[in-house]
Image (spheres, rainbow, N blue to C red):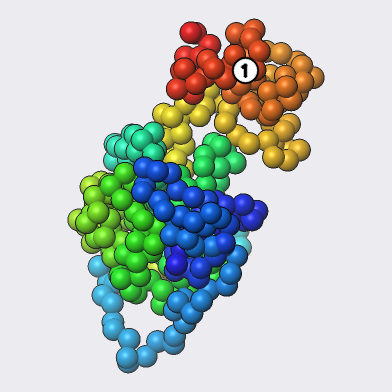
Amino acid sequence: MPAPISPSGADAVVLGDQAECSGAPTRSAQHGSHAQPGGGPNGASSGVPNNGRTPARSMPGPHMPRVMLDHLTTEARNPASEGLESLSTVQIVQVMNAEDRKVAEAVGRQTEAIARVVDEAADRLSRGGRIVYQGAGTSGRLGVLDAAECPPTFNTESWQVVGLIAGGRDALTTAIEGAEDNPELGAQDLRDIDLGKHDLLVGIATSGRTPYVVGGLRYARQVGAYTVALSCNADAEISGLADTAITPVVGPEVLSGSTRLKAGTATKLVLNMITTGAMVRLGKTFGNLMIDLRPTNSKLWSRAVRIVGQATGIEPDAASDLLDRCDGEVKVAIVACLTESAPDEARRRLAAAGGLVASAVNR
């Protein structure tokens, strides 16, 4: 069963195929949650090891079906790196760097599709929906990483951006390759978090054919969620299961089939764009300043003070004092300074402006 967790122990992301756990956040009413106090969307709890559902790692053999990968660009041999072991260390690094430069260009060719997803994500978040990432292996880990970084960066609620990884908590640090082979597990993990029509699912599979992700996308379509397929191979199977396909074709990897390299980098770039773009649309930035961050440690407090100073022009000591009076709320401090109002009045202005600082300042 999936269970909300975070690296810090606070609730932040959901890991697919988890045992029952405690301390998960309750869902919003828009999702029809019936969580018990202290429990997750289905009464799940956090912090308990996997309960036997994580598929065991198995050795290859004649009993395992052969998957046809020859047609996949990500599995092809890269002519630039065929003599890799004969190169000097500097040359190895140069080859990798030259290949990495192709990644941004491949992502750039997908800007229109990414922009559609950004707008759809922002709209659904504004109406109480969620962004849900689902993947296996590197793809799943990157989704979990992006989800975990949203609360401290954008002050989102822990349930708003969710990461699901095949194999659960153990799969974050240990390769559990067999977890990706069952499409029903992908569907079940979405049932466990009560995926619905208000949500947006990003199925991440650089190969474009991971059964766990295929099963998840099919289930998401059945319940009316908006579906996105993120892969790095043209004509990917998952592209035909999605409302929008994002397909940065980065070419063969330096190590054939090692999609943690260029394909992984492309995936990270796309996920960065989806959440950052959506949060900009939701008013969680002021210019290019992170005005909704949570100053939960000394580094982040210093960053918050600097942001208040940059947005208002006041000196660091004054910005720190103002931020303290505004209970660490950067947006409130900025509006209070620019409108010469008390913190409560600044909060009222922000509420009336839908959280948009520029609108609150000009009211």
Viewer can see residue 198: yes
Where 296 sits versus 4, above or below? above
The residue at 28%/65% (across/down) is 215
In the rendered structure, the answer to whether residue 165 lies left or right of residue 110 reads: right
Q: Residue at x 35, y 70 (%)?
A: 185
Residue drawn at point x = 39 percent, y = 62 percent: 192
Residue wearing tag 1: 344
Q: x%, y% of residue 147?
A: 49, 49
Q: Is residue 312 left or right of residue 287?
A: right
Residue 43, placed above or below residue 106: below
Q: Position of residue 9 (x, y in %)?
A: 64, 56
Percent of width and height locating residue 226: 27, 46
| Residue positioned most to the left | 240
Image coordinates of residue 280 in percent, x first then y, are 45, 30
Q: Secondary structure at mark 1?
A: helix
Q: Quadrant of residue 108?
A: top left
Residue 301 in which image quadrant = top right
For the residue pair 229 and 343, the one nearer the viewer reads as: 343
Mark 1 residue type: Asp
Q: Dot 1 surroundings within 10 Å: few (below 14), some, or many (20 or more)?
A: few
The quadrant in which the N terminus is found is bottom left
Q: Is residue 338 left or right of residue 175?
A: right
Residue plotted at (54% across, 70% down): 170
Which one is in front, 304 or 17?
A: 17
Which residue is farthest right? 317
